[in-house]
Image (spheres, helix red, strand yellow):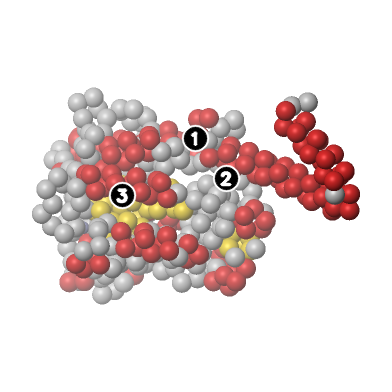
Amino acid sequence: MSGHATFFVILWITLREVFPEWHGSFVQSLTRIIGAANVLVVVTAIVGLWLLPASDRPVAAPPARAAERSTPQPTGPAVEEAAQPPGVVATPEFARQVKANELGLVPVLMYHRLVAKRRSSIDRTPAQFRQELEKLARKGYVPISAKEFAAGDIRVPAGKFPVVLTFDDGHPSHFAFDAGGGPARDTAVGILLDVAGRHPGFRPVATFWVNHTPFGLRTEREQAAAVRWLTGNGFEVANHTWSHPDLRSLPVKNVRKQIARLDRMLARLGADPVTTMALPYGSMPRAKKAARQGSWNGTRYDFDGVFLAGAEPSVSPYAKDFDRGAIQRIQSNGKKGECRKWCSQYWLEWLDKHPGKRYVSDGDPERVSVPRRLRGNIEAKRRPQVNAY
Ligand SMILES: [Zn+2]
């Protein structure tokens, strides 16, 4: 018998002798405590198992993305952490325990250039980007791509929060190769991979919305190598129009041309089929539908999501009022000037102060778990998946 068990037996006998009339209720309480402890051990074991990095998990994680991909193997080190984790089966009781709310708000963060010397208010330094990622990782956010978000394919462990990291304009500070054929360390991709390596479970996943010269690369060969590396490693490269015009100022035919031309280029470079786009300047064409669906010169597009340029967290893609033709984003920035409100520092603090408003995953990709009071807000198509508690 272990020292702890001996101690409890002696304590129990002593209590029975000293307080005979308490003995009955004490035994009942003890039984209850032991029962609760067992439940706690089991729950801890399950949660612990779930939080292990994919490579440590005893169950083989389905390499869904890798299997679907037909592009050649990327150069440079593979990024296995980007694979989506397998789900759990969420019961109402489980969903309640992890405080799941899959109708909550999701921050879709918007980045532009990462430069050591900021010239524009929307520039961020590499250090600021790294700090924001560290903060997200510490707080329990897990990155998903804009494509996954718009499709409602959110595979985040139970109790964690999805965040979408998006980069506009395809700047060289987002992605570049180093001498060894991997991503350069000071780029957005390099920094994200480094932070993910230090925080198991923080998926190195992001979306790059590019124009006609992705990442400042001039030749088609270089562009294709970059696009293939990114999509081969779980990143999304998608549509930010051909030449970044204000779509509101264009006739609808030119809106379609701007979008279709870039889709064609991405297909030629070997990107995955494009399912998302971001509006330059967040400016909606006068015919709103033309941003999401249309065709030009034989090229059709039909996006799962069209993204704006500000200025609040997005509603969940499972919510009735989710508008996939105008998805909100948040500019990454501190709390100065115009960003006193509406930018990332403000909103991440706000979400911390209003945990009941935030999207919290149930860990189960097949179910949409929500507190009972919110079940009426679910989009009709998702109703068969509801797990209300
Ligand atoms: Zn832009």
Question: Is any part of residue 2 visible from this angle?
Answer: yes
- Of mark 2 and mark 1, the one earlier in the sequence is 1
Pointer 1 local density, CA inside 10 Å: few below 14, some 14–19, many at least 20: some
Say which residue appears at 57% left-offset and 58% top-offset: 99
Q: Label 2 near label 3: C-beta < 8 Å?
A: no
Q: Work out how far the residue at label 3 is from the one at label 2, CA to CA, in angstroms.
A: 27 Å
Question: Is any part of residue 313 visible from this angle?
Answer: no
Say which residue appears at 40% left-offset and 53% top-offset: 163
The disc placed on residue 132 is: 3
Foreground residue among 321 and 201? 201
Instruction: Give the labeled residue for mark 1.
Output: 53
Q: Label 2's element?
A: loop
Question: Which of the two marks, 3 or 2, is nearer to us in this view?
Answer: 3
Q: Is residue 267 left or right of residue 383?
A: left
Question: Which of the two marks, 1 or 3, is nearer to us in this view?
Answer: 3
Pointer 2 local density, CA inside 10 Å: few below 14, some 14–19, many at least 20: some
Q: Is residue 95 left or right of residue 240?
A: right
x and y percent of residue 377 in the render?
Answer: 54, 71
Q: Work out how far the residue at label 1 is from the one at label 3, CA to CA, in angstroms.
A: 22 Å
- Amino acid type at image mark 1: Pro
The disc placed on residue 87 is: 2
Say which residue appears at 42% left-offset and 60% top-offset: 352
